[in-house]
Image (cartoon, grey):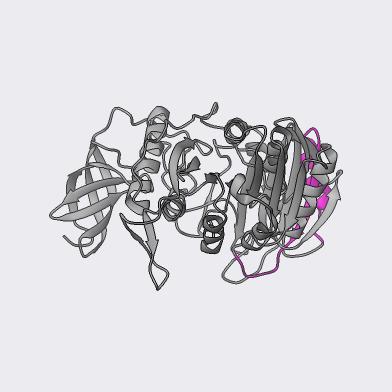
Amino acid sequence: MEKNDIATVTAEGLGTQGEGIARCDGITLFVPYLLKGERARVKILKVKDKTGYAKAEEIITPAEERVRPKCPVFYRCGGCQLQHLRYRDQLKFKQDLVRDTLKKIGGIETKVLPCVKSDKEYGYRNKLQIPVGGDGENIFVGFYAERSHRIVPTDNCPLHPDWTKPLLSALKNFMEKCGLDGYDEERRRGHVRHLVVRELKGKYLVTLVTTVREIKGIDYFCHLLDKIFPEYSLYLNVNTRATNVIFGSEFILVKGVGGYESSEGGIFFEAGPNTFVQINDAVRPKLYERAVSLVGEEERVVDCYAGGGLLTAMLAKKCRYAYGIEVIPEASRCADALKKRNGLEEKMTNLCGRVEDRLKEIPDLGDATILLDPPRTGVARSVLKEILLCGPKKIIMISCNPATLARDLGYLTGTLAETESGELLKTENGPTMYEVSLIEPFDMFPQTRHVETLALLTKTH
């Protein structure tokens, strides 16, 4: 089998990216947008050793669960992977994904609860984050193709609310009328790099990411935004660096109050243009309420990777005392303001610094519960080692990456052991201080391969 060959295959299952997995002539083929059980003609794109990648040319026998995608650029845009799969089957795929990843990477065989569904299959995102490109003559507004920074132009996205289409039209109108160029990454030139919008209960934080501090015609952009949003704040964010990071360090308030108050689980908080808030307003409270339900009223809880302190405050409101640890000073200051705003001065302490360092300052950790909500890269090994030394009675983990979740749980439960070189290998003789008591996925990101997972570990001795 070689590149550009045509083969007829049947998908035996789905891979971690949501792609179909088929076998042909001893080669395992990965075929995007092919569903389990489907028979298709495919074109071979690449073969190396016993693994190949192919493109579906014709679906000969479609699966019953195949549906028509809502987005016209679905097969070219890299934002979604599952719009062609019926929603109830997306939930089953994510449940299976978490279970299989735990076993394959972490050596953990355990029951995984059904994936908690999103009340909205589409239009669920409270945040739009869209790149703006250009070649000096044309403006490209859209999302990146899979594994690239090539923008696929679009005038709407069904994962986002109804305001998305008029907003993107207004952005292009503004840029064309005022002679502004989209950003060219290769030549590092152009005026506008991204548009970012966060919705908070009918109020909007709009940020235009630019390469200059002053944008010609910004008043005209405000005029267009006035017709779309009932109440909003507009920021310019200046980013001149050659980086994939969207925001630069400087935010300039152009219009509005700058930040808005919102609430979650009875906790009031203020959000600014760079405040982290989970993007699905329907699933987020389900996840947080479930996490809080795992903590008793008399327990002390340590919330590691605490961010702006929202979940720490929700825990403090219920339990005896809560600590929040966060390495970013600005976020830790926000957590202090949130603590004061909600009258939790006597029940909550925020510590700024590295988790592995600040954990050592908290007394009697062996009688506490530790909550971990790390970034996609997972929990640092140094943090996991410190937790095992402390021996808390319970560990709650929230993860947006099944692979790093499996790795971290394997280390904590002893199904993975660290070699002298730092590599983690499966073992049957590791320490068994903790066991998995609960694994529950939450569909924070419908139509995509991503899934949020809640895990509970309890101490065995």
Which residue is outermost to the left?
Answer: 25
The stretch in magenta equals: 214-243
> Within the image, what quadrant is residue 44 found in?
bottom left
Residue 437 place in picture, x, y as percent: 45, 38
Q: Is residue 155 left or right of residue 148?
A: right
Which residue is outermost to the front?
Answer: 461
Residue 32 in sight in this render: no
Residue 412 place in picture, x, y as percent: 46, 53
Does the magenta run of residues contain 222? yes
- Residue, x 71% and y 48% (percent of image)? 323
> From the image, which quarter does the N terminus lie in?
bottom left
Q: Nearer the viewer, residue 347 or 279?
A: 347
- Residue, x 58% and y 39% (percent of image)? 156
Q: Is residue 91 left or right of residue 53?
A: right
- Residue, x 47% and y 35% (percent of image)? 440
In the rendered image of this protein, does residue 70 appear above or below residue 356? above
Q: Is residue 405 left or right of residue 295?
A: left
Does the magenta run of residues contain 347? no
